[in-house]
Image (cartoon, rainbow, N blue to C red):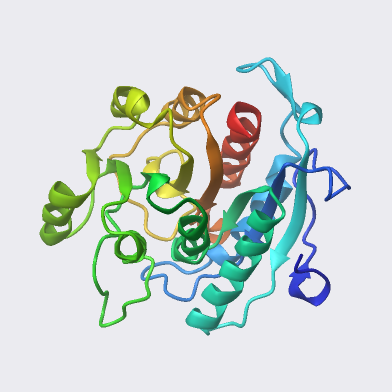
Amino acid sequence: MIEGKYFVDPGKFLGATEDYEKAEVVIVGLPMDYTVSFKAGSRFGPAAIRQASYGLEYYSVYLDSRLEDKKFYDLGDLVLPYGNVEKSLDLISKATEDILKSGKKGLFLGGEHLVTYGILKEYLKKYEDNLVILHFDAHTDLREEFFGEAYSHATVMRKVWDIAKGIKMYNFGIRSGEKEEFEFAEKNTHMFLYEVVEPLKGVIDDIKDYPIYISWDIDVVDPAFAPGTGTPEPGGITTKEALEAIHILKDLNVVGMDLVEVSPSHDIAGITSILAAKLIRESILSFF
C-alpha cells in the first residue's frame, strides 16, 4: 500500500477505524483543482468534508444504522505535485490500484472532477465492460477538449468513455453543456436531463446485477443548497433528492465512489461541506 510521505493527515472522517487491514472501504482525499475553469478551491474540499463530518451523528435515522457498524479507513490526502496534471492522475491511479489489489473498495473525496479519470482507469482494468458508471452532475463533462486541453474537469466523462467504448454510463441531473455533448450522449450514454430520483428508480432493474461505480459532482445539487462549488449551475436537485438518490442504491453492488467539486472558499456557512459529509455517511451506511 502507498503510505508515509505519499499521504498527509488532515484529520479523519467521522467513525473511521484505526485498522487498515480490517477495513472494507478506504477513504482517500484527492486535493487537485488544476483544471477548474471558473472558481478554483476544490483542493481544500476533502479536508472541509472531513471537518464537517464531526457535526453529524454516527447514527442515520434514514437507515437505522450507525457508522460503528461499518469498517472503513481514512488514508488522508494523497500528496500531488501542484500543477502537474498527468503525474497527479498517475499517482491517483496508483493509489486506486493498490486499494483494489488489497481487496477493498475506494471512497474518494475531491478535488476537481478530473480525478475520476485517474480512478476509473484502474476500475475499468479490474471490471472491464461489466462496470456500470453512475454520473451525477449538472454538466455533461463529455467534451473532447476544453480551451485546447484534453485533460479537464469538462472532459472527464468523455475520457472515461474513450477508455472503454460502449461502457454502461448513466448521467443524471444534467442541465448544462454544449450541443455536441448532448448529441454524443444520445448515441453513447444514458443521459437524463434535470432530474435524478425518478430516472434512477427507472434503471435499477437494468443495473442491479452489475458492479457499480458512482461519480457524484456536488453541483448536481442546486446552488441554493450547495453554493460551495467551482461551477454552480442553477436549476438543480434539492438536498432531500440527493439523499433519496443515495438510499435508492441501498444494497446494490457499489464497488467505488467519488464525491467531487466541493470548494469551501465559496461556501456559505459550510452548508455544502456538511451536505457532502452527510452524503458520504449515508453512502457508507447504504451500500458499503
Task: Give x and y (percent) for residue 158.
Answer: 29, 62
Image quadrant holding the C terminus, namely top right
User: Residue reaching furthest right?
Assistant: 18
Picture residue at 75% right of the left edge, 74% below the top: 6
Q: Is residue 268 visible?
A: no
Image quadrant holding the N terminus, namely bottom right
Apparent side of residue 253 relative to residue 16 in the rendered image (left or right): left
Picture residue at 84% right of the left edge, 49% below the top: 21
Apparent side of residue 12 relative to residue 85 in the rendered image (left or right): right
Instruction: State which quadrant residue 54 falls in.
Output: top right
Task: Give x and y (percent) for residue 70.
Answer: 76, 32
Establish if 284 lies above or below 59.
below
Establish if 281 lies above or below 185.
above
Establish if 117 lies above or below 252.
below
Picture residue at 57% right of the left edge, 36% below the top: 279
Task: Give x and y (percent) for residue 247.
Answer: 51, 24
Q: Nearer the viewer, residue 89 or 241?
A: 89
Apparent side of residue 7 relative to residue 44 in the rendered image (left or right): right
Q: Is residue 88 visible?
A: yes
What is the total number of numbered labels drawn onto the structure image?
0
Q: Nearer the viewer, residue 11 or 78?
A: 78
Task: Give x and y (percent) for residue 7.
Answer: 76, 69
Instruction: State which quadrant residue 142 falls in.
Output: bottom left
Q: Nearer the viewer, residue 213 or 179?
A: 213
